[in-house]
Image: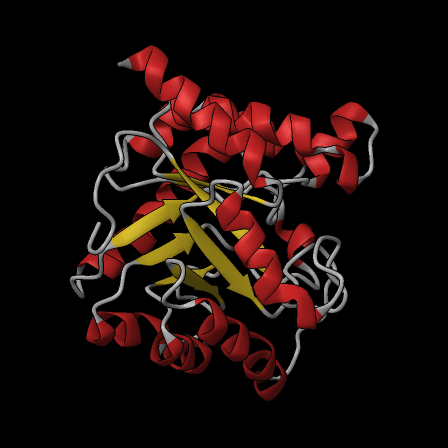
Amino acid sequence: MRGFPDLGRTRVMGIVNATPDSFSDAHLGDAVEHGLRLLDEGADLLDVGGESTRPGAARVCEDEELARVVPVIAGLAGRAAVSVDTTRASVAQAAVDAGAVLVNDVSGGLADPQMLPFVAAAGVPYVAMHWRGHSADMQTRAVYDDVVAEVCAELAARRDAALALDVDVVLDPGLGFAKDADHSWALLQRLDALTALGRPLLVGASRKAFLGALLDKPAAQRDAATAAVTVLAAQAGAWAVRVHDVAPSADAVRVVARVGS
C-alpha cells in the first residue's frame, strides 16, 4: 500500500465519528481529542466520517459533511495518519487537501462517479466497500442466493474498476451493509474467499447489529465481541480492522502476529 509500510501485522483503524447522532462520539468539538486518545490506545490510523451510515440513517448535505470532517482532519493531520469516510468526491478532495492520506468509501465508487477519477488523480490509497445502496433503504437489498459468492463478485468488479485507473485499492466486505446477521456471519466464516481477491482487506465489525443479535447486547456493550472479530480478521491476514474501542484490538493484532511469527 502506497504510504503504508508493512507492519508485520494487521493495522487498527480507529473510528472518529464527527456526527451528532453517532452512537460513539457524542460531541463534534471533542472529535480531535477523541482521535488523539485513540492514538494513545494504539490506533495506527484514524478514520474521520461526517455522515452516519448505519441502517436507516438519512443523508446529510455536502456542506454539512464538509463542515463536520474538514476541521477534524486538519486538527489530526500531522499527528496521525488520517482517512476520510465519505462517498462524495468533493468531500474526499477537501479531506485530502486538509491532510487525509486515505479515502474510505462505503459505496466503492458507486455513489459518486467522480470518486475513482479523483483518487486516481490524487494518488491516494482507497477503500472500496461492498455496497448496494444508501443507508436509508439498503437493508431492502439484503437478498442473496450465495452471499459469499455474490459479495466477492461485486467486490471484484469494484477492484477491477479501481485498478483500471491505477488506484491502490483495499476491499471491505461491508458487514451489516445490505446484509442481515446471517449474511455477515457467512462472510466472516469465509474471509479466505475475500483475501483471495488479491487485494488488502479491511474488516469493519465494530459494535454492529449482527453482534448485538447474537449476544442480546446494546452497541456500547459489544466491544469484547468486536475484539474477537479482530482476532479472526488478523488470523485471516486482513490489512486492517476498523474499530471504536482501539486498545483491545491493538493488543489482539499483536498477539496474533506473535503467535504467527
Please say if 182 is above or below 55.
above
222 vs 36, left or right, is: right
- Foreground of the two, 261 or 152: 261
Quarter of image, res 180? top right
Please say if 166 is above or below 130.
below
Please say if 229 is above or below 157.
above
Residue 144 can be seen, yes or no: no
219 vs 15, left or right, is: right
Residue at 67 percent across and 26 percent down: it is 224
- Foreground of the two, 157 or 204: 204
Residue farthest to the top, as pictured: 259
- Foreground of the two, 16 or 212: 16
Quarter of image, res 80? bottom left
Where residue 168 sits: x, y (%)? Answer: 22, 56
Q: Which quarter of the image is occupied by the C terminus?
A: top left
Where residue 227 sits: x, y (%)? Answer: 58, 28
**Color style of the picture:** secondary structure
Residue at 60 percent across and 70 percent down: it is 50
Where residue 106 sits: x, y (%)? Answer: 49, 58
Please say if 182 is above or below 46.
above
Residue at 29 percent across and 76 percent down: it is 118
The total of numbered circles placed on residues is 0
- Foreground of the two, 149 or 212: 212
Residue 77 can be seen, yes or no: yes
Quarter of image, res 163? bottom left
Residue at 36 percent across and 73 percent down: it is 99
Where residue 171 sits: x, y (%)? Answer: 36, 46
